[in-house]
Image (spheres, helix red, strand yellow):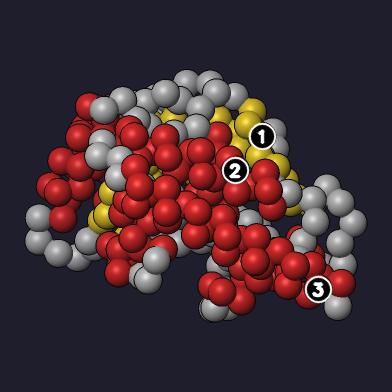
């Protein structure tokens, strides 16, 4: 009951933050991806601070190139963006979502259309455009979110596209924890990976206290082996290993 009441009290604040974010986008209309990434960074910093969510990093957020990470839900995106300006890669379906789709588009998201002719070429072209602006690209090679108990095998397509651009790819590992007392089992609510409606999950998250996110970054880009550069499946395995190597320190 306490968590439900806390959610009700915080919901108007979340709606106000989103409304202000939409208004600022309409007013500023950032044209470059760098400017859009900067807007998203400021929006996420302000929103998480007002909602009592802390984000810290171990290691430095790479200033350019690609960053790959494990994936546990939409909060991952907000946390990465709060650490610094960056652009995300997402499935194209999100572009059609009400409000959220418009915000992700305006914040510079690179959309990938799976299973369509020429999608790989378009993805590489978009990634090169972002690289030219000096903005890091963040994506999640698992292709879907999990509950945090394991890291799923990495999909090969987008990772191979990034390797072909020649940009450095840095591994990261993200983890959640609760730093304040909550009801038993509350930590299991943090990942968003099942069929729970998005609005329902957000409402539950609003009722939690002391949400803390930590993102560990590797000290250097992934040194893919010559064999991996020629075999996308081997590259995906080496990339996953680089992400998992950071988990042991988390």
Residue under label 2: 46
Image quadrant of residue 72? bottom right
Q: Residue at x 55, y 30 (%)?
A: 217
Task: Compare residues 208 and 23 and report the one nearer the observer.
Answer: 23
Crowding near the residue tagged with mark 1, few <14, some 14–19, many ≥20 C-alpha atoms within 10 Å = some
The spot of residue 243 in percent (x, y) is: 52, 39
Image quadrant of residue 196? bottom right
Sequence-earlier tag: 1 or 3: 3
Q: Residue at x 47, y 21 (%)?
A: 220
Q: Return the residue found at the far front.
A: 27
Sequence-earlier tag: 2 or 1: 2
The spot of residue 90 in percent (x, y) is: 35, 55
Secondary structure under tag 2 reads helix
Crowding near the residue tagged with mark 3, few <14, some 14–19, many ≥20 C-alpha atoms within 10 Å = few
In this rendering, which labeled residue sits more in front, label 1 or label 3? 3
Secondary structure under tag 3 reads helix
With 125 as the anchor, is 42 left or right in this view?
Answer: right
* Distance from the alpha carbon under mark 3 to that under mark 2: 23 Å
Residue 139, label in figure: none
Q: Does residue 246 appear anywhere in the picture? A: no
Q: Return the residue found at the far right.
A: 181
The spot of residue 2 in percent (x, y) is: 87, 72
Location of the C terminus by quadrant is: top right
The spot of residue 18 in percent (x, y) is: 51, 58
Residue under label 3: 5
Residue 56, label in figure: 1
Q: Residue at x 10, y 55 (%)?
A: 118
Task: Compare residues 212 and 236 and report the one nearer the observer.
Answer: 212
Q: Residue at x 54, y 45 (%)?
A: 44
* Distance from the alpha carbon under mark 1 to that under mark 3: 28 Å
In this rendering, which labeled residue sits more in front, label 2 or label 1? 2
């Amino acid at each position: 009951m306490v968590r439900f009441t806390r959610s009700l009290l915080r919901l108007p604040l979340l709606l106000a933050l989103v409304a202000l974010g939409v208004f600022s986008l309409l007013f500023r209309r950032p044209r470059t991806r760098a400017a859009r990434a900067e807007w998203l960074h400021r929006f996420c910093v302000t929103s998480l601070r007002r909602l009592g969510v802390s984000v810290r990093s171990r290691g430095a957020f790479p200033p350019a190139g690609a960053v790959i990470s494990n994936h546990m839900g939409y909060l991952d995106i907000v946390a990465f963006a709060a650490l610094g300006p960056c652009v995300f890669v997402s499935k194209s379906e999100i572009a059609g979502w009400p409000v959220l789709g418009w915000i992700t588009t305006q914040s510079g998201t690179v959309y990938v259309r799976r299973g369509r002719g020429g999608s790989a070429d378009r993805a590489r072209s978009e990634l090169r455009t972002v690289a030219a602006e000096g903005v890091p690209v963040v994506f999640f090679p698992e292709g879907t979110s999990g509950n945090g108990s394991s890291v799923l095998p990495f999909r090969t397509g987008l990772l191979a596209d990034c390797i072909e651009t020649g940009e450095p790819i840095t591994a990261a590992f993200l983890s959640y924890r609760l730093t304040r007392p909550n009801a038993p089992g509350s930590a299991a609510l943090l990942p968003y990976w099942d069929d729970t409606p998005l609005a329902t999950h957000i409402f539950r998250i609003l009722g939690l206290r002391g949400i803390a996110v930590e993102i560990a970054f590797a000290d250097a880009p992934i040194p893919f082996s010559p064999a991996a550069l020629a075999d996308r499946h081997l590259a995906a395995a080496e990339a996953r290993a680089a992400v998992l190597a950071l988990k042991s320190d988390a």
